[in-house]
């Protein structure tokens, strides 16, 4: 399956600002069933882009704009291929719990057991765990995580505007409402409390007409990945009560939202700013490969063209070059 | 520096010209009539009351000077400090007041042998700590081998994941270190804590020398005290050795600003090194390169001696609300276009819990026995230690792992029952956050108090420079608890300081 993703971000300022500095985490990852076929970023005002790979393997772009500007527009365009994976087993091996040890987990996976800013235990979450019987389960972790995915889907209403990007999970827990980011943080905190390494996945969801997705289709999406020693990282989407699969396009992973915001930036000037975001994910055809597009004009087996100049003259000219 | 205030100080001749016919006994004879010798090791007197040989010259001077002359010299010292504007801000709950750190008139003297051991021990320690930092931000061998618990590193608020797999010049993370040493009852120097973030106090080491050598010129001359005045030059060499390029490096000292408690020191060091003193707003990052704004345009900066905490250094990466930092600085650093000294994320290794593991780290990385020992430390994260600590709160000093400067600690023997009970609750609620140590009797040193010479508790903070090579200027800041019996020497808690004389033999 091929997808084309267009992700436009626009900051508008009430008066001119200067020295904008910005980091972007919006390049789809290329690993497992997902591969990135093309990617480009255009900014307006134009800026020199720099890139690095962070310790989580996310591609990060950054740039700065020194001169005054009243608007900053970032347009990212990607083509991604996702191949279907064999379906997951209904449950994991009953011995799975005993595999959460130093032999099977890497340091990075241990790190994802520690609480992080947005995904940590709070009294509110402890009460939620008691109310919904979500203490560390006895049966296999895959089945338990599936149940947790469904429980969260049922316990919360999807309502944009109740929480914002910086809301702690307690806001959603109190209101029983929120958006994908809140549900992901809650699920991560619970999975970690069970001793399962869990991380936040940020990216895009392709909405097919027939699907009953709650999440908005013109925005970025977030879900959860939990580590099962015998199966690897498995994606859960508590917002839509589905497993993350062929329709989930991963841009970045991290301990929580803090590690993976699509844009993060600062500017100088006392202006108010307005942020507008638009995302379009469309199914597309396989991009034409260069090999197919280019027509070979002269096959390699054809005779060498006759040199227009005798060989010795050619050598002589080379020797004349100082 | 100005020294007018000391213009009246006269030299009363060599120290051996007025030796009294019989020695003055501490606790009995002037000027030592209130000098209490007890369980702690004393720097000047043996337990029997005899003067250690390296203090003989000073003793000779103290016992022969007229009583009011010492007082006059002390006042002259204080005047000099006020004139130079050497001040320090003490933060309390609701106000910050600017004070001078009281400098004691009397030097603390360290013998050549003692110093050799301190120097070797500190070099060993900083080498191991740098290897540890390189490891936990790289392969994390030490965690996989189970030498240090993973949760202690990954759970530390000073562990900077942004530093993972990032190469720092010469593998030197800690470029300026100020370790606090104390002397136990047996007279052995032990390490109390490592300050690996932005240690301060070196300007007092230098300023104290300027003043105190003039208060006792003849004694100073007679003793072959090792020079420390080249510290700023050594610091500059260390910073230069970290430059990303080989051409003449452009260096700046980055200060939080005039309201910072150590602003005097930042300005002092910049001036002494002949480099720019900048605040965050003076710098900007363009196309991944750091520049300072000057009247003649932008000037590239290669090495930044930063005196701003990690959290505040780049609002793009760390605290968004920081107005002290430079947006984009970390990415320029990541790209190798600028060096920050110290590197970021060094605080994970001077955490008071990691401290307890340093002797093991020395054995692990260097296959050597530690030259300088630690103070015995109980990690409250270990259940057995926690119950021991709770049962012995009246005998122990309990410290919060992530705090420094004497904040968030309980000195058991000096606390009331109510304070201890309250602290026990905090301990039980969050044991991982605390360590405990026996109350250590810091050694005492002669200190000028109310016209006489009395014993006061002291520690020792030498400064270690680590770039391409390791350098320790033979000197230190000796901090002194000016209140009788007090063990808290922190300048933020009203301690004072002393000049420290390291002898060549």
Image (spheres, coloured by chain):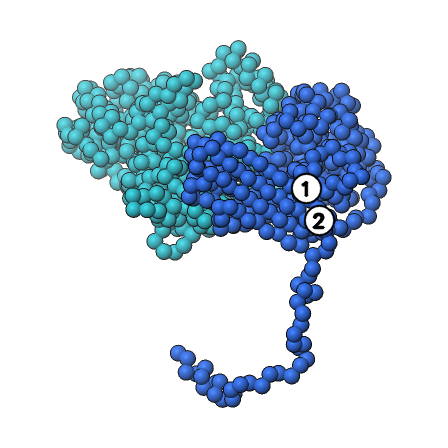
Chain colours: A blue, B cyan
Q: Earlier in the sequence, mark 1 or mark 2?
A: 2
Q: Quadrant of residue A99?
A: top right
Q: Identify the secondary structure beneath mark 2.
A: strand
Residue beneath the point at 22% across and 28% down: B83
Please say whether residue B110 is visible from this viewpoint: no
Q: Residues within 10 Å of mark 1 (few under 14, many from 20)?
A: many
**Residue B250, position in %: x, y?**
35, 48
**Residue A218, position in %: x, y?**
67, 38
Q: Residues within 10 Å of mark 2 (few under 14, many from 20)?
A: many
Q: Which residue is mark 2?
A: A3
| Chain letter belonging to callout 1 | A
**Residue B464, position in %: x, y?**
40, 41
In the picture, the quarter occupied by the N terminus of chain B is top left
Q: Which residue is mark 1?
A: A204
In the picture, the quarter occupied by the C terminus of chain B is top left
Residue beneath the point at 84% across and 42% down: A89
B389 vs B207, left or right, is: right
Given residues A210 and B234, the one toward you in this image is A210
| Chain letter belonging to callout 2 | A
Give above or below for A109 relative to B480. Answer: below
Q: Residue furthest right?
A: A90
Q: Identify the secondary structure beneath mark 1.
A: strand
Given residues B501 and B111, the one toward you in this image is B501
Q: Quadrant of residue B87?
A: top left
**Residue B162, position in %: x, y?**
54, 42
* Cα gap from disc 1 to disc 2, whole angstroms: 10 Å
Residue beneath the point at 19% across and 19% down: B68
Residue beneath the point at 60% across and 31% down: A165
A187 vs A42, left or right, is: right
Given residues B81 and A187, the one toward you in this image is A187
Please say whether residue A180 is visible from this viewpoint: yes
Q: Are marks 1 and 2 in contact (CB under 8 Å)?
A: yes
């Amino acid at each position: 399956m091929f997808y084309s993703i267009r992700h436009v971000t626009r900051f508008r300022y009430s008066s001119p600002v200067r020295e904008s500095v910005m980091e972007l985490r919006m390049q789809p990852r290329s690993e497992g069933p997902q591969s990135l076929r093309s990617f480009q970023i255009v900014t307006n005002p134009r800026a020199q882009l720099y890139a690095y790979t962070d310790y989580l393997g996310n591609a990060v772009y950054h740039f700065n704009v020194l001169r005054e500007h009243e608007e900053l527009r970032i347009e990212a365009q990607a083509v991604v291929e996702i191949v279907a994976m064999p379906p997951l087993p209904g449950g994991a091996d009953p011995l799975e719990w005993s595999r959460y040890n130093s032999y099977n987990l890497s340091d990075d996976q241990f790190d994802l057991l520690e609480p992080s800013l947005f995904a940590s235990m709070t009294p509110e979450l402890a009460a939620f765990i008691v109310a919904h019987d979500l203490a560390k389960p006895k049966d296999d972790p895959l089945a338990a995580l599936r149940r947790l995915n469904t429980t969260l889907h049922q316990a919360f209403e999807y309502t944009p505007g109740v929480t914002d990007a910086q809301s702690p999970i307690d806001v959603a827990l109190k209101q029983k409402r929120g958006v994908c980011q809140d549900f992901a943080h809650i699920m991560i905190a619970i999975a970690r409390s069970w001793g399962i390494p869990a991380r936040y996945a940020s990216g895009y969801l392709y909405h097919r007409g027939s699907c009953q997705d709650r999440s908005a289709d013109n925005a970025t999406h977030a879900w959860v990945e939990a580590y099962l020693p015998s199966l690897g990282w498995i994606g859960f989407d508590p917002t839509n009560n589905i497993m993350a699969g062929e329709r989930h396009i991963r841009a970045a992973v991290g301990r929580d939202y803090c590690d993976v915001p699509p844009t993060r930036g600062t500017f100088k000037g006392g202006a108010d700013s307005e942020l507008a975001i638009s995302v379009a994910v469309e199914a597309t055809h396989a991009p034409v490969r260069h090999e197919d597009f280019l027509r070979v004009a002269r096959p390699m087996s054809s005779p060498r063209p006759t040199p227009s100049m005798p060989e010795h003259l050619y050598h002589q000219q080379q020797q004349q070059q100082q | 520096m100005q020294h007018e205030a000391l213009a009246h100080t006269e030299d009363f001749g060599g120290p051996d010209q007025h030796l009294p016919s019989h020695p003055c006994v501490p606790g009995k004879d002037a000027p030592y009539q209130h000098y209490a010798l007890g369980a702690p090791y004393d720097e000047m007197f043996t337990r029997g009351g005899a003067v250690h040989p390296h203090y003989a010259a000073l003793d000779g001077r103290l016992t022969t000077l007229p009583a009011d002359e010492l007082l006059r010299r002390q006042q002259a010292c204080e005047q000099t400090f006020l004139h130079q504007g050497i001040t320090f801000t003490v933060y309390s709950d609701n106000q910050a007041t600017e004070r001078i750190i009281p400098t004691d008139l009397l030097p603390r003297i360290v013998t050549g042998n003692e110093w050799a051991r301190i120097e070797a021990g500190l070099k060993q320690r900083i080498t191991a700590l740098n290897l540890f930092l390189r490891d936990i931000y790289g392969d994390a061998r030490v965690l996989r081998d189970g030498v240090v618990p993973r949760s202690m590193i990954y759970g530390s608020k000073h562990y900077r994941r942004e530093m993972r797999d990032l190469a720092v010049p010469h593998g030197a993370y800690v470029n300026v270190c100020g370790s606090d040493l104390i002397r136990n009852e047996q007279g052995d120097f032990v390490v109390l804590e490592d300050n690996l973030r932005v240690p301060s106090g070196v300007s007092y080491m230098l300023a104290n020398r300027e003043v105190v050598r003039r208060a006792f010129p003849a004694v100073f001359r007679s003793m072959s005290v090792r020079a420390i005045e080249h510290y700023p030059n050594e610091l500059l060499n260390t910073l230069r050795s970290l430059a990303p390029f080989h051409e003449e490096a452009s260096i700046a000292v980055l200060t939080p600003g005039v309201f910072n408690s150590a602003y005097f020191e930042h300005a002092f060091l910049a001036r002494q090194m002949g480099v720019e003193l900048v605040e965050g707003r003076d710098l900007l990052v363009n196309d991944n390169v750091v520049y300072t704004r000057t009247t003649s345009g932008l000037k590239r900066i290669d090495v930044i001696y930063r005196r701003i905490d990690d959290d505040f250094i780049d609002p793009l990466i760390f605290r968004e609300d920081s107005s002290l930092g430079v947006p984009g600085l970390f990415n320029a650093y990541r790209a190798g276009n600028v060096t920050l000294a110290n590197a970021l994320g060094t605080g994970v290794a001077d955490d008071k819990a990691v401290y307890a593991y340093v002797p093991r780290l020395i054995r692990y990385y260097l296959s050597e026995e530690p030259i300088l020992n630690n103070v015995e430390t109980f990690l409250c994260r270990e259940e057995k230690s926690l119950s021991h600590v709770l049962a012995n709160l009246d005998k122990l000093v309990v410290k919060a792992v992530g705090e420094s400067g004497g904040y968030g600690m309980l000195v058991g023997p000096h606390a009331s029952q109510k304070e201890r009970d309250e602290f026990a609750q905090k301990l039980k609620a969050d044991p991982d956050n605390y360590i405990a140590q026996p109350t250590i009797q810091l050694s005492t040193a002669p200190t000028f108090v109310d016209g006489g010479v009395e014993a006061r508790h002291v520690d020792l903070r030498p400064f270690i420079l680590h770039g391409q090579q390791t350098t320790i200027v033979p000197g230190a800041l000796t901090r002194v608890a000016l209140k009788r019996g007090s063990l808290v020497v922190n300048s933020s808690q009203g301690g004072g300081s002393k000049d420290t004389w390291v002898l060549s033999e």
